[in-house]
Image (cartoon, helix red, strand yellow):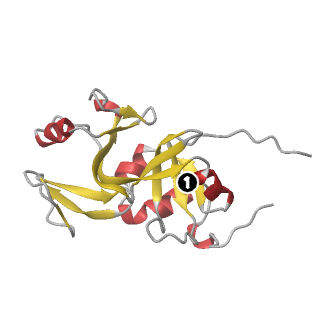
């Protein structure tokens, strides 16, 4: 019997790195998929803190810094264009020119205007500031999925915004009904 394979695009889904992920940039990563079609896939890592950004400064400072309203936690979004700032945010403010709706509840924006709005208290209620993104060429992500490098789950605002970075990978695995402690680092295909 021949299996009918039709591509399933993963925009708005989560990629959850398997324990055996060999690329250290993605070990125990949770990636929110922003865009996926037959020619490419892009996403941002949502669980790797990189430091914080001080309002009024162009530089990211490593470490955690004090909890000031003037500081924004910054996350490593991926190895591509690490200078590109992307705000993953709730859909309550989806009115920016560069906003892309990822799901009904999650958006991304890369305009400086969103930072200005956050600074004055008029930004989206929930947000995650990331630098860089992850990208795959045609068929590359599909190959990694066939090699069992990733699990696929649903993105939720609670997991993206309200779960501690150190707990996102386990929470994402658990959302699939899998005990993270029992997940093997080796997989196979039937």
188, above or below 97, in the image: below
| Relative to 63, 176 lies left or right | right
Residue nearest the viewer, comparing 13 with 164: 13
**Is any part of residue 177 visible from this angle?**
no
Give the labeled residue for mark 1. Answer: 175
Q: Residue at x 26, y 57 (%)?
A: 74
Q: Whole-percent x and y of residue 134?
A: 43, 54
Q: Whole-percent x and y of residue 88?
A: 34, 44
Q: Residue at x 46, y 62 (%)?
A: 29
| Relative to 82, 185 lies left or right | right
Q: Residue at x 43, y 67 (%)?
A: 25
Residue that protrudes farthest toward the left in the picture: 56
Q: Whole-percent x and y of residue 70?
A: 10, 52
Q: Which quadrant of the figure has residue 20?
A: bottom right
Q: Which quadrant of the figure has residue 101?
A: top left
Q: Residue at x 36, y 61 (%)?
A: 165
Q: Which quadrant of the figure has residue 99?
A: top left
Q: Residues within 10 Å of mark 1 (few under 14, many from 20)?
A: some
**Is any part of residue 100 visible from this angle?**
yes
Q: Whole-percent x and y of residue 190?
A: 81, 60
């Amino acid at each position: 019997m021949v299996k009918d394979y039709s591509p399933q695009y993963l925009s708005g889904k989560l990629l959850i790195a398997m324990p055996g992920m060999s690329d250290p940039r993605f070990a125990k990563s949770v990636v929110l998929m922003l865009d996926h079609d037959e020619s490419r896939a892009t996403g941002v890592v949502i669980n790797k803190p990189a430091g914080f950004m001080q309002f009024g400064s162009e530089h990211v400072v490593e470490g955690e810094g004090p909890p000031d309203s003037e500081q924004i936690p910054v996350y490593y979004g991926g190895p591509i264009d690490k200078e590109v700032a992307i705000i993953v945010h709730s859909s309550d403010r989806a009115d920016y020119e560069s906003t892309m709706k990822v799901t009904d509840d999650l958006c991304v924006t890369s305009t400086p205007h969103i930072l200005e709005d956050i600074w004055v208290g008029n930004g989206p209620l929930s947000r995650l500031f990331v630098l860089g993104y992850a990208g795959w060429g045609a068929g590359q992500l599909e190959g990694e999925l066939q090699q069992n490098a990733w699990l696929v789950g649903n993105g939720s605002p609670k997991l993206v915004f309200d779960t501690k970075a150190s707990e996102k990978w386990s929470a994402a695995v658990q959302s699939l009904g899998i005990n993270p402690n029992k997940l093997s680092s080796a997989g196979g295909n039937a």
